Amino acid sequence: MRVAGAGFCHTDVMPREGSGPDGPIVLGHEGAGVVEAVGPGVTSVVVGDHVVLTVDSCGTCARCDHGEPAYCERVRERNFAGFRADGSTPMTDAAGAPVAARWFGQSSFASHAIATERNAVPVDPDLPLPLLGPLGCSMQTGAGASSSSWTCGPGRASSCSGPARWGWPR
């Protein structure tokens, strides 16, 4: 995916604070962009789709089967390790050493990101793609927290306000 925009949150500071892989890493976990290539068997996105990237998940554990991919039983290894689930990486440095380039299954603080079909969500191409990255984490985290904490389900209204605008236009 060619990255058009990415949000930033505290999770992207975690490796600096010691909670992440050692060595070089490409961070970024709120990416949005345009699909430039797809692998064999991929059916939910096609070249040219506008997508928002979200948390990576295995798709086979009980939590994923229950429709809760953010609580995937393999969430740590698929998102916080910085590497693919098999331990490999799509990137090396000039000396050939591995670079952790799968932070949250995307590493979207780069010109391009490699994601899985499970964490690439197609969006309307008429939406302002450079601003949509936060939908992949902060917006869904806030929506999930409010719907869980306030028991605000489908068909119910709620309001949330605060002083920060986190990259949204004025």
Image (tube, grey):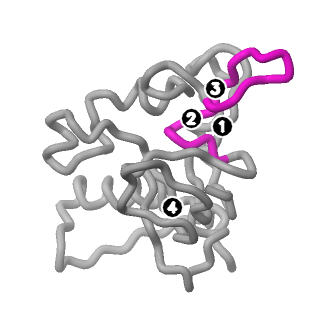
Q: CA distance from mark 1 to mark 2?
A: 6 Å
Q: Is residue 92 above or below residue 134?
A: above
Instruction: Name the residue at 32% across, 28% down.
Output: 74
Pointer 1 and pointer 2: residues touching (CB < 8 Å)? yes
Q: Amino acid at mark 2?
A: Trp
Whichever of labels 3 and 1 marks the residue nearer the N terminus, that label is 1
Q: Which residue is rendered at x = 62% and y = 41% of the image?
A: 107
Where does the magenta region start and end?
90-108
Residue located farthest toward the right when viewing the structure as drawn: 94
Q: Which residue is mark 2?
A: 103
Q: Nearer the viewer, residue 24 or 87?
A: 87
* Residue 56 x %, y %: 41, 41
Q: Mark 3 touching mark 2, by CB under 8 A?
A: yes
The dot on residue 100 is 3
At x 63% / y 32%, what residue is drawn?
90
**Along the polypeptide, which appears first: circle 2 or circle 4?**
4
Residues at marks 3 and 1, CA–CA distance in whole angstroms: 8 Å
The type of residue carrying mark 4 is: Val
- Disc number at residue 27? 1
Which residue lies under the disc numbered 4?
Answer: 52
Q: Is residue 124 magenta?
A: no
Asked if residue 64 lies left or right of residue 168, the reply is left
Indicate the secondary structure of the residue bearing disc 4: strand
Circle 3 Cα neighbour tier, 10 Å, few/some/many (<14 / 14–19 / ≥20): many
The residue lying at 48 percent from left, 66 percent from top is 46
Instruction: From the top left corner, tell me how far across and down residue 148 is, in percent.
Output: 22, 54
Residue, far front: 40
